[in-house]
């Protein structure tokens, strides 16, 4: 097992409020491709950044709906991995943990994490593009995308696209927690997409210990106090076992 820095283990054991910000890398070991690696087969010709926009949906709603249907099937085939379960365990061991995710796959909730703050929505939900209301059922007439049963608007995934505002309550909770925590984990995210990418910097500005878990370097790496360069499904369970060796149930 890796030797983790004593200072990090101490910070973990002493923390009163931990914030965890996760990105697509946390689900990679569940077989869900990361956002920027998602494109294979038919979809390899498209850049995800060009499909996850309101303009793309306006231009070609059928194409964007089909891309999300393909990704939803990948998500529904995935199961939480040891990284997700380690975060459930961490929540049990510290006085307060705020789990903020950019992921739209719902795997933290499936693993058993409570009160997950979803910054970018959830691919398993559908909403009306006109009324912005979540829609659970609709009539399948063969039209793609299907129509809202209330107003006839086009249905779309309930996710946040580039240029769209994040859910205001979720964002406010994330900002306040980042400013109040003593330990902040940034896990499996490229740390490129705002406003999520600013959260660890809010924590840093308040003197929190910032830890990054990611096999590759990101714009956050040089600012983080501890960098654990490995897959989260391996690093997180090891780290918890190192911090609480007497309770080896992860
Ligand atoms: C592993 C691993 C393993 C691999 N273990 N790690 C300020 C400056 C510049 C630009 C902006 C700014 N403020 C806003 C912007 C614009 C824009 C933005 O940030 N652009 C950047 C690209 C520069 N932001 C927005 O538009 C946001 N909206 C906004 O700010 O609105 C303002 C507004 C206010 C009021 C009214 C109107 C508007 C919205 C951003 C929404 C992002 N949405 C997406 C799509 C969601 C739906 C979908 O999935 O299709 O969210 S984009 C995409 O990026 C997705 C992700 O959640 C997000 C982050 O990606 P993530 O998670 O980091 O994934 P990857 O793939 O990039 O990285 C994976 C990482 O995992 C890698 O680092 C790997 O190394 C690592 N990894 N295996 C651990 N096993």
Image: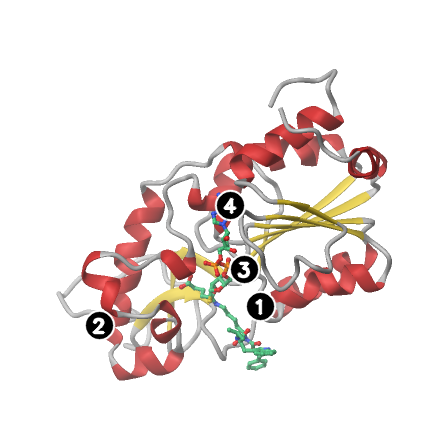
Front disc: 3 or 4: 3
Residue that badge 4 annotates? 26
Q: Is residue 218 above or below residue 160?
A: above
Question: Does label 2 point to a residue whose CB lies under 8 Å from ligand 1?
Answer: no
Residue 171 in the figure: left or right of residue 45: right
State the SS at label 4.
Answer: helix
Q: Which residue is the site of mark 1? A: 167
Q: Nearer the viewer, residue 142 or 110?
A: 110
Tag 3 secondary structure: loop
**Residue named by callout 3:** 190
Instruction: Bin the neighbour count of mark 1 within 10 Å (Cα to Cα): few under 14, some 14-19, many 20 and up.
Output: some
Residue visible at 77% across and 51% down? 225
- Mark identifier at residue 62: 2
Which is more toward the observer, 126 or 201? 201
Q: Which circle's residue, 1 or 3, is located before the other in the chain?
A: 1
Question: Which element type, helix, strand or loop, lies under badge 1?
Answer: loop
The percent coordinates of residue 242 (x first, y second) are 71, 26
How far apart in space, not on screen, are marks 2 and 4 (Cα)?
29 Å
Any part of residue 125 in sight = no
Query: Mark 3 vs ligand 1: CB under 8 Å?
Result: yes
Label 1, label 3: how many angstroms apart (C-alpha)? 21 Å
């Amino acid at each position: 097992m890796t030797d983790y820095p004593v200072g990090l283990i101490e910070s973990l054991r002493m923390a009163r409020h931990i914030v965890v910000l996760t990105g697509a890398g946390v689900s990679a070991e569940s077989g869900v491709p990361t956002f920027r690696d998602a494109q294979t087969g038919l979809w390899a010709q498209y850049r995800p950044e060009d499909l996850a926009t309101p303009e793309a949906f306006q231009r070609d709603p059928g194409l964007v709906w089909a891309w999300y249907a393909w990704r939803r099937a990948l998500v529904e085939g995935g199961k939480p991995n040891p990284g997700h379960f380690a975060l459930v365990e961490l929540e049990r061991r510290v006085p307060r943990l705020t789990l903020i995710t950019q992921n739209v796959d719902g795997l933290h909730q499936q693993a058993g994490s409570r009160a997950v703050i979803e910054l970018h929505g959830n691919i398993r939900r559908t909403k009306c593009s006109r009324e912005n209301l979540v829609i659970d059922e609709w009539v399948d007439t063969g039209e793609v995308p299907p129509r809202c049963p209330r107003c006839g608007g086009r249905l779309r995934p309930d996710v946040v696209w580039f240029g769209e505002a994040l859910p205001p309550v979720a964002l406010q909770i994330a900002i306040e927690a980042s400013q109040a925590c003593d330990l902040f984990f940034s896990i499996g995210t490229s740390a490129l997409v705002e406003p999520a990418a600013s959260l660890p910097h809010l924590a840093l500005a308040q003197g929190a210990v910032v830890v990054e878990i990611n096999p590759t370097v990101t714009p956050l790496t040089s600012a983080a106090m501890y960098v654990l360069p490995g897959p989260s499904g391996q690093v997180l369970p090891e780290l918890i076992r190192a911090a609480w060796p007497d309770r080896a149930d992860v």
